[in-house]
Image (tube, grey):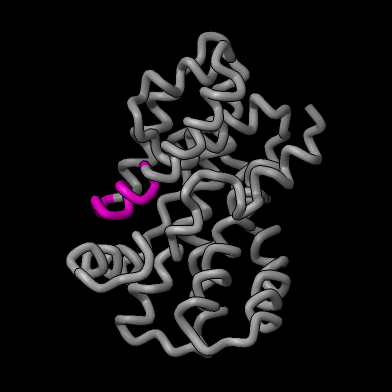
């Protein structure tokens, strides 16, 4: 498979993984008082914390998917340890389920896809992302960048539904985050194992996820 095309596909919001139902925490952040003009700063914060962890874990999962024997369990446990809030675990698991479904349909006999299924029906998103990237032939930078870009696009796309924002402004937020994305890509690929997987806390995002889970009126799952 053409890895360049695979990288684009993996970062495409139209990929049927359920990503359209997630705001990357923007909806609860706005409910907690985040101002519209603070959304770009919020986006940068996620790229340097929550999403950095995901990007680094996806790189580790990609490496594990190419090794023999394939060991994904310790990476999965490390991601869970860095995601203390159950609603955020659940959101990641839903996205992981969508990616795992794609993998099982497209590459059912791939050794890493089989190993991913052993983690259960809802593996955390970065594990599934790394396995799909391995099956597509992506390299480490490609999977890390796809992870970070998709999260930034989730914030921008959600803002169009939650705020009176010009679509050109929302698109600019993502383009303007290019430097932060590259910084996080570099940090992600420099990770050598679970012991130095980033553990950057984002307490307000975690708290927002807890509050959001109790609301009966909401647009996004998370």
Residue shown at the point (23%, 62%) measured from the top left: 213
Q: Is residue 160 left or right of residue 88?
A: right
86 within the magenta span: yes
Q: Position of residue 29 (x, y in %)?
A: 37, 76
Residue shown at the point (51%, 23%) measured from the top left: 104
Quarter placement of the C terminus: bottom left
> Which quadrant holds residue 34?
bottom left
Q: Position of residue 45 (x, y in %)?
A: 50, 70
| Closer to us: 151 or 80 | 151
Q: Is residue 122 left or right of residue 37?
A: left
> Where does the magenta region start and end?
84-93
Q: Is residue 65 left or right of residue 219?
A: right
Q: Position of residue 39 (x, y in %)?
A: 51, 80
Quarter placement of the N terminus: top right
Q: Position of residue 16 (x, y in %)?
A: 54, 44
Reply above or below: 22 against 99: below
53 within the magenta span: no
Q: Is residue 66 left or right of residue 30?
A: right
Number of marks: 0
Residue shown at the point (38%, 73%) measured from the top left: 27
Reply above or below: 48 against 163: above
- Specify whether residue 59 is in view: yes
> Which quadrant holds residue 66?
top right
Reply above or below: 18 against 215: above
- Specify whether residue 44 is in view: no
Task: Name the magenta segment's main secondary structure.
Answer: helix
Residue shown at the point (52%, 89%) measured from the top left: 164
């Amino acid at each position: 498979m053409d890895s360049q095309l695979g990288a684009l596909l993996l970062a495409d919001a139209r990929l049927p993984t359920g990503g359209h139902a997630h705001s990357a925490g923007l909806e609860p952040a706005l409910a907690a008082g985040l101002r519209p003009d603070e959304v770009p700063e919020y986006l940068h914060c996620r790229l340097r914390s929550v999403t950095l962890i995901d990007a680094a874990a996806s790189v580790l999962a990609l490496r594990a998917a190419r090794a023999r024997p394939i060991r994904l369990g310790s990476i999965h446990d490390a991601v869970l340890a860095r995601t203390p809030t159950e609603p955020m675990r659940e959101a990641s698991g839903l996205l992981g389920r969508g990616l795992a479904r794609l993998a099982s349909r497209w590459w059912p006999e791939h050794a890493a896809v089989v190993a991913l299924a052993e983690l259960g029906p809802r593996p955390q998103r970065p594990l599934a992302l790394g396995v799909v990237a391995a099956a597509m032939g992506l390299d480490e930078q490609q999977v890390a960048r796809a992870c970070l870009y998709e999260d930034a696009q989730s914030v921008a796309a959600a803002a169009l539904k939650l705020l009176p924002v010009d679509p050109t402004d929302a698109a600019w937020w993502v383009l303007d985050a290019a430097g932060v994305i590259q910084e996080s890509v570099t940090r992600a690929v420099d990770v050598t194992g679970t012991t130095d997987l980033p553990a950057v806390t984002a307490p307000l995002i975690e708290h927002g996820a807890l509050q959001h889970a109790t609301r009966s009126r909401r647009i996004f799952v998370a």
